[in-house]
């Protein structure tokens, strides 16, 4: 997925050129790198054009921790 890496580099350059704070750029870059690593680990490899909402949902579920209402209430 070299295309992903090139796309990420171009996006971050444009994002930085907009004058956004360096912390925001670093945070966004880290999140996109993490998303790219997750995509690259999928087998069979997924083309950028074939990323669908279901795949995005699976990524969010994979890197999030969901708690039951009873667990949150107890705390």
Image: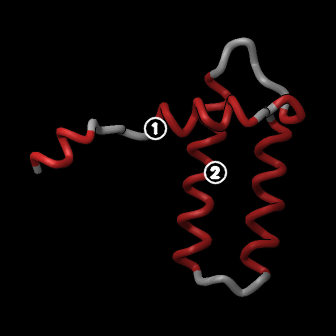
Q: Secondary structure at mark 1?
A: loop
**Spatial distance from mark 2 to mark 1, Cα to Cα?**
13 Å
Q: Residue 63, which numbered label?
A: 1
Q: Which residue is mark 2?
A: 32
Percent across and percent down for residue 56 are 66, 37
Q: Secondary structure at mark 2?
A: helix
Along the line of sight, which residue is nearer the eye, 20 or 2? Answer: 20
Q: Residue 21, which numbered label?
A: none
User: Residue 41's image quarter?
Assistant: top right
Cβ–Cβ under 8 Å for marks 2 and 1: no
Along the line of sight, which residue is nearer the eye, 47 or 3? Answer: 47
Quadrant for the N terminus in the image: top right
Residue at 16% across, 48% down: 73
Question: Residue furthest toward the right?
Answer: 49
Residue at 29% across, 38% down: 67
Query: Looking at the image, is 2 positioned above or below residue 21?
Result: above
Query: Looking at the image, is 41 positioned above or below residue 12?
Result: above
Residue at 64% across, 51% down: 32
Along the line of sight, which residue is nearer the eye, 51 or 1? Answer: 51
Residue at 66% across, 40% down: 36
Specify few, some or many for label 1: CA neighbours under 10 Å numbering under 14, 14-19, or 20 or more. few
């Amino acid at each position: 997925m070299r295309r992903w890496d090139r796309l990420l580099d171009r996006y971050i350059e444009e994002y930085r050129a907009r004058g956004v704070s360096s912390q925001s750029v670093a945070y966004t870059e880290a999140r996109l790198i993490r998303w790219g690593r997750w995509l690259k680990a999928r087998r069979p490899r997924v083309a950028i054009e074939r990323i669908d909402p279901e795949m995005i949902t699976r990524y969010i579920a994979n890197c999030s921790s969901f708690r039951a209402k009873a667990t949150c209430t107890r705390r």
